Image (spheres, rainbow, N blue to C red):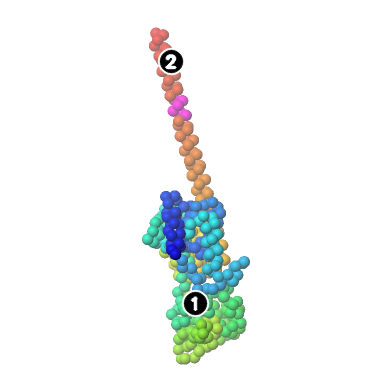
Amino acid sequence: MHDMSDATNNNAVNDAAGDAVYDVVVVGAGAAGLNAALVLARACRRVAVVDAGEPRNAPAAHMQGFLSRDGMSPAALLAVGRAELAAYGVPLIEARVEQIDPGYFVRLAGGPVLRARRVVVATGLRDELPGIPGVRERWGRDVLHCPYCHGYEVRDQPIGVLGTHPGAVEHALLLRQWSADVVFFPHTLEVGEEERERLAARGIRVAEGVIKQLVVDGDRLRGVELAEGQVVPRSAVFVFPRMVPHDALLTGLGCERDRGGGWVITDRSGRTSEFGVWAVGNVADPRAQVVTAAGMGSAAAIAINHDLVQEEIERAVEDRRTADAVSSVSSYSSASLRQTGEAASLMGESRHTH
């Protein structure tokens, strides 16, 4: 049998690359991008979605804290979202966007160029994990990041927090909410006296020493091994990754970043400093959970539709004024011709009389 997925995607690319201009092209098919496309489709806008197929939360088996979707797998949510968009006739193109040129010309890797009046960038971020053996292998399983996403599932269990990020102490202090057995591993992080006092006040133990590796047995995390050989038993470990936004498309368009140079600046609707460009989801906000990202997509879609409506009203007014001006000139010309003809007729009659 032939694999029809490539053929289907090629058809979507060919259809999307027609001569017509899209109202909006959405780059990224996570919760933010899909929800933006859904709201725009329901506003009767011509929309296309392009996605490279690399969701940040792919390692996670479940997502929590999303009303009516609590415990659902991220992959299942995206599959449902894609199906809903398909029902509205929105093409979803599996491709990587290499560049967006002003105008807006959305250039697909090795493929055609899509033309849009507005663009939504929902490309997310990547988590840069520390190079401690075992961290990447267990990421999204029993090596976790967000307490609000996964804390409840490991409540009352022995939890470790790795000191691989300046925010790790605050991370440990927060996680004490979910378990009375929290151990902080400073690793190579310098921890001040005031921070140690706060940890002690919350009943959080500190395990000194450089971390050698995570100990895994039977496909389960068993503990954290220090360089001296001591193994501290833990059933879950939290780590604060370095979050790097996938914002090359935005910076390539000239979108301004914040003073720290880390994140693109947007207003509450996701509008960037560049006309016609919106950024939603984790590419603009590292703290956005799935439910938050979906809301950001909806807010951006509504703002974009209002923006397009305003543009269309202004264009219609301008066209009407132009038409009225042409009609006025035409009427004036006709009147002038009639007056010229009447004058010529009178002159002719005058000559005939004389």
Question: How crowded is the residue under tag 2: few (<14 C-alpha within 10 Å), some, or many (20+)?
Answer: few
Determine whether 50 is above or below 159 in the image. above
The residue positioned farthest toward the left in the image shown: 110
Q: Quadrant of the C terminus?
A: top left
Q: Residue at x 60, y 80 (%)?
A: 155
Q: Secondary structure at mark 1?
A: loop
Q: Nearer the viewer, residue 59 or 11?
A: 11
Magenta region, main secondary structure: helix
Q: Residue at x 47, y 33 (%)?
A: 327
Closer to the observer: label 1 or label 2?
A: 1
> Can the viewer see residue 161?
no
**In terms of image quadrants, where is residue 351?**
top left
What is the spatial separation of the Cα atoms under label 1 and label 2, in whole angstroms? 98 Å
Instruction: Check disc 2 and report the residue beneath it.
Output: 346
Say whether marks 1 and 2 touch (CB < 8 Å): no
Q: Secondary structure at mark 2?
A: helix
**In terms of image quadrants, where is residue 14?**
bottom left
Determine whether 267 is above or below 176 in the image. above
Instruction: Check disc 1 and report the residue beneath it.
Output: 139
Residues drawn in magenta: 331-336
The amino acid type of the residue labelled 2 equals Leu
Q: Nearer the viewer, residue 312 or 114?
A: 114
Q: Nearer the viewer, residue 53 or 327?
A: 53
